[in-house]
Image (cartoon, rainbow, N blue to C red):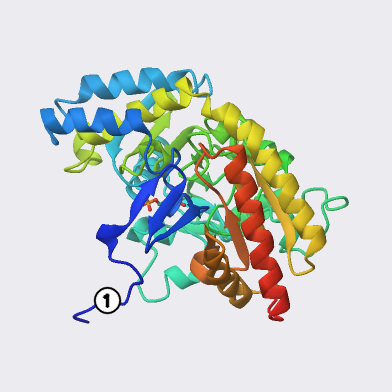
Amino acid sequence: MAATVDTPFDWRDIRGDGVRLKAGGRSYIDCASGTFNLSLGYSATEVKQALHEQIERCCHLSSELTREKSLRVFESLREHLPSHIDGYWFRDIVGSTAIECAVRIAQKATGKTEIISLFGSHHGQSIAATGISGNAFRQASFRLPVIASLKVPAPDCNNCFYDKTPDSCGMFCATRLDDFLEYASSGQVAAVVIEPILGNGGNIVPPPDYFGRLREFCDRHGILVIADEVQTGFGRTGEFFASNGLARELRPDVIVFAKGAGGIGIPVAGVLMRRELDVLEPWEHSSTAGANPLALVALQATIDYINKYDVLANVRALGPVLRTELDRLGHEFPSMENVRGEGLMLGFDLPDSASVAAFIEVAKGHGLLLRGSRYGFGRTVKVRPPLVVNAAEVADIVRGLRSALTELQEAGVG
Ligand SMILES: Cc1ncc(COP(=O)(O)O)c(C=O)c1O
């Protein structure tokens, strides 16, 4: 192992302030919201304050002792949930194990085993979650999967697996689901898991009718629907959960959240479900840090902050502004294609992954932190600032993107 690590900054000198990261005497707007988990940016005061107070009381309690707090948190989430979601399981602090919790629920409730997911999906880094995700590069070095897993083509109209166009395809990708079930599955499918917007896969937004078609398919075959809202949850698309917004027709049986739920980056995850799916025993899915007080306090404070400052209204107001500006840039720069997204979960394509890498590096010089899709293997640039971004910061983002695109164009890249 190397004795030194080559990083541009001493991490102790890095400061987060609102939507900005300050390091090496420079200030960057973090358009990746950290690891896409800083829904409230780096420094939401009330969240920090609530955490300080809890640290003074204690940092850990067993989940037995925080049961009451979990219930209170769930009660404050209720107004933001589809009305049929009336159960919860808060024993996770990362999305990967929360996804495994949802899989366990589906398997135990249905008595079946297999999970259907989409090409390009990402449901986590644990062995089971990687096995049900649709990317070979994450699996190649391991003996996966441990769960029977069937992947089907994603409803990605910019890159249709079937080479069709949305105006005339009749939603062919949804139509073919029955064939996959009949000819490619084990016949023992417990659940379909779907991200309402495929985040890591490239900010892929399914056409609105896809969700209803998928629900209808699942209803016909007694298959549960798990909405992986690890990225889309907590206001990212302009609704608290996409399952109440763009993916309303999905009517998921189970919703998984993580990332943005911790507001300023405190790890916390959870599973929400129809109450009759509350089938697990505590010993069947829990962990040492599950439902710890810091996680629950961060979760509660994040919900309160979103309500108090009407963060959803901010996303609904500024998301379209940023989107319009990205569309405009798309017309100015031929290398920029397929602007897409919802709320503040936006993205666009460049010609290939090498131009994405070059663009991200150049954008840093113009004060923006960005991330590409598929861990650098994809050709999408994701533009997802914290949900508390303001109009002036949106203008700064657009300015930075235009300067970076200009620089790249002049250098003949892309
Ligand atoms: C959609 C989605 N699901 C699940 C996960 C796994 O979450 P975690 O990294 O917290 O384990 C991720 C992480 O990137 C994700 O994007």
Up the image or down, 64 lies above or below 130; here it is above
Instruction: Decide if residue 10 is on the left or right side of residue 385.
Output: left
Q: Crowding at label 1, few (<14), some or many (≥20) Cα neighbours within 10 Å?
A: few
The residue tagged with tag 1: helix, strand or loop?
Answer: loop
179 or 61: nearer the eye? 61
Residue 346 visible in the displayed image:
no
Q: Residue at x 43, y 42 (%)?
A: 18
Residue 28: tell me if it is visible.
yes
On screen, residue 231 above or below 55: below
Residue 358: quarter of image: bottom right
- Quarter-wise, where is residue 140 in the image? bottom left
The residue under the point 37% across, 64% down is: 24
Quarter of the picture containing the N terminus is bottom left
Closest to the observer: 121 or 5? 5
Residue with the mark numbered 1? 5
Answer yes or no: disc 1 within 8 Å of ligand 1. no
Location of residue 245 with respect to 351 vertically, above or below? above
Q: How many marks?
A: 1
Left or right relative to 254: residue 342: right
Could you say where residue 286 lies in the image, as x and y percent from the top left? 22, 40
| Residue type pointed to by label 1 | Val
Nearest the eye: 184 or 26: 26
- Measuring from the top left, give residue 297's x and y in whole percent: 27, 29
The C terminus is located in which quarter?
bottom right
341 left or right, relative to 93: right
- Which residue corresponds to the image point at 22% horizontal and 82% vertical from the top-left? 2
Q: Residue furthest front?
A: 25
Q: Position of residue 187 (x, y in %)?
A: 52, 51
Residue 355 position, x and y percent, is 63, 75
